[in-house]
Image (spheres, rainbow, N blue to C red):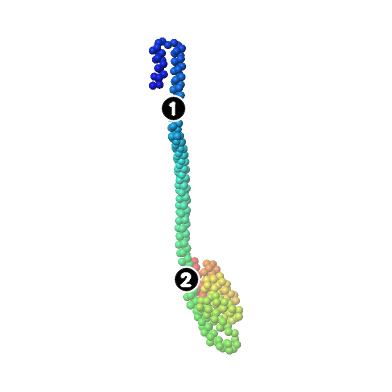
Amino acid sequence: MKKNILLLPLVTLVLIGCATTDDLRRVQMEFDRRIKVVDEKVETVVDNKILALDPKFAALQAENAALRMELEKTGEAISASRRNTAETGANVTDIRDNLQQLRGQLESQVEAVRKDVTAFTARSGRREEENKDIRDKLNNINFKLNFIENFLGIGKREEQAEGTEKNEKSKDVAKGKPDKESAYAAAYELFKEGKFDRSREAFQNFLKQYPDTEYSDNAQFWIGECYYFEKRYENAILEYEKVAKNYPAGDKVSNALLKQGISFLNLGDKASAKLILERVIKDYPNTNQARTAKATLLNIK
């Protein structure tokens, strides 16, 4: 349509006649002017249409920019997630390796503890057997001692003396004699009741008051016996030694030496026990104490 309007003057000139050069130039200039006008109008129309559509376009641009930002953020999040996943995977691998190492160490420790427990159990079993043997030996010795004491009459003579003391007590008191028999009998009664600490103290007090009487060696012997039955063998050995040292002429020396040797044996000192028992056999032959010493020596390995 626009082209037809522009070509109309040219067609008119052709129809009128042949046109000159100036005419053609003028026509060309007019043609160019009109084209420029048309272009300006077209541009104006286009600009107006663009302006009319501009809010929607701007909104689309803003939405597009927002989408781009979201896409960038999403991309960054994905990248971070991938890095975290990679790091997590590496951490999991490290943790797995550490756990494997710890498991190996723990298994080694458990195995070591198991071996220690096994060894301890074996030692405990052997120790229990050794303790049982020792208990059996001690029970056997105690049984033999009880048998020997009953066989030797230790205690019976004390009971007989106690009866005699009771019969003579009133006479001694009437004559003004010290009541040594009563003190001795009271100390021995405590011994028979198993009150060894009190009996020992009573015999010690007796010796302080009556250091040199017919009962003094017996009192010293029973002090040793109190320690012996308390299984305080070191103290018993010292008290038995006082019997032989302070009352060498008394009738308790052989008994004191015999019990001294047995006390050494209970302490595990076999060498000292042998020396004492051999002394009993040598110094008191053909006595019950010597026979008991011989039997005891046969059991010492």
Of residue 43 and residue 150, the one placed in the foreground of this image is: 43
Residue carrying label 2: 139
Tell me the distance, in whole angstroms, between the alpha carbons under discs 2 and 1: 132 Å
Please identify the residue farthest to the front as the structure is shown: 16
Along the horizontal axis of the image, is 45 left or right of 179?
Answer: left
Of residue 134 and residue 4, the one placed in the foreground of this image is: 4
Residue 32 x %, y %? 45, 18
Along the horizontal axis of the image, is 285 left or right of 46?
Answer: right
Mark 1 surroundings within 10 Å by alpha-carbon count, few (fewer than 14), some (14 through 19), many (20 or more): few
- Relative height, residue 32 to residue 141 (above, below): above
- Judge whether residue 162 can be spotted in this image: yes
Task: Indicate which disc, 2 or 1, sits on the residue closer to the N terminus.
Answer: 1
Residue type pointed to by label 2:
Asn
- Relative height, residue 168 to residue 121 (above, below): below
Of residue 145 and residue 198, the one placed in the foreground of this image is: 198
Viewport quadrant of the N terminus:
top left
Q: Which mark is residue 45?
A: 1
Residue in the picture at 53% in, 68% down: 267
Mark 2 surroundings within 10 Å by alpha-carbon count, few (fewer than 14), some (14 through 19), many (20 or more): few
Residue in the picture at 55% in, 68% down: 272
Instruction: Tell how many labels.
Output: 2
Residue 50 x %, y %? 44, 30
The mark closer to the camera, 2 or 1, is 1
Q: Tell me the SS state at disc 1.
A: helix
Residue 268 x %, y %? 52, 67
Residue 238 x %, y %? 57, 72
Residue in the picture at 58% in, 87% down: 173
- Relative height, residue 100 to residue 60 (above, below): below
Q: Tell me the SS state at disc 2.
A: helix
- Judge whether residue 212 can be spotted in this image: no
Residue in the picture at 45% in, 62% down: 125
